[in-house]
Amino acid sequence: MKLAIVALALVLSACTTLVTPKLASSQDDAALADSSVSPFDNDHPAISRLDPKLRDAMQQAARDAEAKGIKVVVTSGWRSRDYQQQLLDEATSKYGSLADARKHVNTPDKFTHVTGKAVDIGYTDAADWFSRKGSKYGLCQTYSNEMWHYELATEPGGECPPQLANAAG
């Protein structure tokens, strides 16, 4: 019985090794190993490499949301070009074509996460709060199919521009 358990553990370990992504993500890529980080974790590249004005606006909005009892996390902030390309490659495989993938993930040359000018907000209630209150801080939901994606797209208190249908524009 013990031998069978050890053999099963070895097989499972080998299977786990086989599904490792081709590009190992790291904090330097700003990949979030646990899928989210505090908006105030200024030591994480996903936060520290955001455009300073975007980071300040996002953090002020998060403080105000949390004062209302709404927990805010960042599910993605700044991303390296390599990590963005990995996400695009994975989306192309998932959706079957680059054109369909681009509706969800843009190229490293065009995506605002790579320049630090975009942040993805989680949980759903936090993204909803940002959608309703974000313009007070200059934060706007950019794409109608991504309720979590925000950019600094207006002056604080201004009106957000019309949303694009998706990342492909």
Image: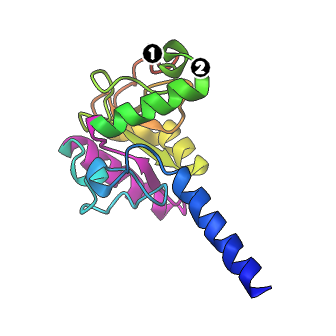
The residues bearing labels 1 and 2 have C-alpha atoms spaced at a distance of 15 Å
Give the answer, above or below, for where 61 lies relative to 168. Answer: below
Is residue 19 inside the magenta stretch? no
Q: Residue most toward the left?
A: 52
Residue at (31% x, 56% y) in the render: 27
The magenta stretch is 53-81
Near mark 2 (Cα within 10 A), the count class, few <14, some 14-19 or many ≥20, is few
| For residue 21, above or below residue 72 | above
Residue at image mark 1: 168
Of the pair 51 and 5, the residue shown nearer to us: 5
Q: Element at badge 1?
A: loop
Q: Residue 113, percent across and down? A: 32, 35
Q: Is residue 139 visible?
A: no
Secondary structure under tag 2 reads: loop
Position in image of residue 162 (x %, y %)? 45, 16
Tag 1: residue type?
Answer: Ala
Give the quarter of the image for residue 87.
top left
Give the image location of residue 52, x and y in percent.
19, 45
The residue under label 2 is which amino acid type?
Answer: Gly
Q: Nearer the viewer, residue 129 or 5?
A: 5
Q: Which residue is mark 2?
A: 96
